[in-house]
Amino acid sequence: MSHITQVVVTIKTGNAPGADADGPVYLGLGPREYRLDKNGNQFQKGATDEFILGNIDPTGQGNVKNPKENDPRNPITIEETELAKAPYAVYIAYESGIKWLVEDVQVRVLGPSLDETYQVRDSIYAPGIWLGQEFGKFLYLQ
């Protein structure tokens, strides 16, 4: 078994009018959710954002706000087998009444003997997938 030590999430927001997100975005990973939030503006029209959770430098902190609380190594470890057991164990969740256009999502999960990338199974067709209260709040990755 291999436990997860780092997660790199890359999200591209679409380029259509009203594409920006205006609410919290979460990563679901096995038994936990993590808040995807860092300093500055995220999820702006046409922009690509990268979020790093877990160990990236000698301090052991990613680039998200509250890095110790948004760390896949603490307070519980997540094993590779937990993601393999369920076909939709990795997802993005958006909590807002304002719509958000997602053009692309990739979640790279890393561990001592693990390097897996999760994405939408057959890619996302243009212009993207709208998320929000009127469209659905979750985007499941495989």
Image (tube, rainbow, N blue to C red):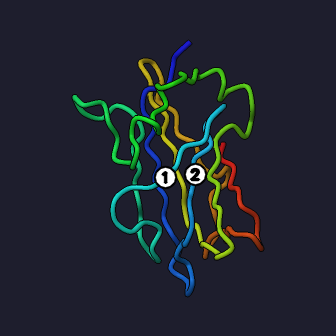
Tell me the residue at 58%/67% (across/down): 102
SS class of the residue under badge 2? strand
Q: Residue at x 76, y 70 (%)?
A: 135
Marker disc for residue 94 = none
The image shows residue 87, relative to residue 14, as above or below, that is above
Quadrant hosting residue 142: top right
Answer with left or right where residue 102 lies relative to residue 51: right
Pointers 2 and 1 in contact (CB under 8 A)? yes
Where, by quadrant of the figure, is residue 98 drawn?
A: bottom right
Q: In percent of the image, x 65 and y 62: which residue is there?
A: 95
Instruction: Establish if 121 lies above or below 75.
Output: below
Q: What is the residue that sits farthest to the left in this orientation?
A: 58
Towards the viewer: 77 or 48: 77
| Amino acid, disc 2 | Tyr
- Please provide percent x and percent y for residue 55: 34, 31
Quickly name the residue at label 1. Answer: 36
Q: Is residue 40 left or right of residue 140?
A: left
Residue 86, percent across and down?
75, 31
The residue closer to the viewer here, 117 or 75, is 75
- Which of the two labelled residues, at mark 2 and mark 1, occupies the earlier sequence position? 2
Image coordinates of residue 51 in percent, x first then y, are 41, 50
Helix, strand or loop at disc 1?
A: loop
In the picture, which quadrant includes the N terminus?
top right
Which residue corresponds to mark 2? 26
Q: CA distance from mark 2 to mark 1?
A: 5 Å
Pointer 2 local density, CA inside 10 Å: few below 14, some 14–19, many at least 20: some
The disc labelled 1 sits on which kind of residue? Leu
Q: Which residue is located at x 55 percent, y 78 percent?
A: 19
Compared to 2, does 73 lie above or below?
A: below
- Label 1 crowd (10 A; few <14 / some 14-19 / many >=20): many
Residue 133 drawn at (x, y percent): 74, 70
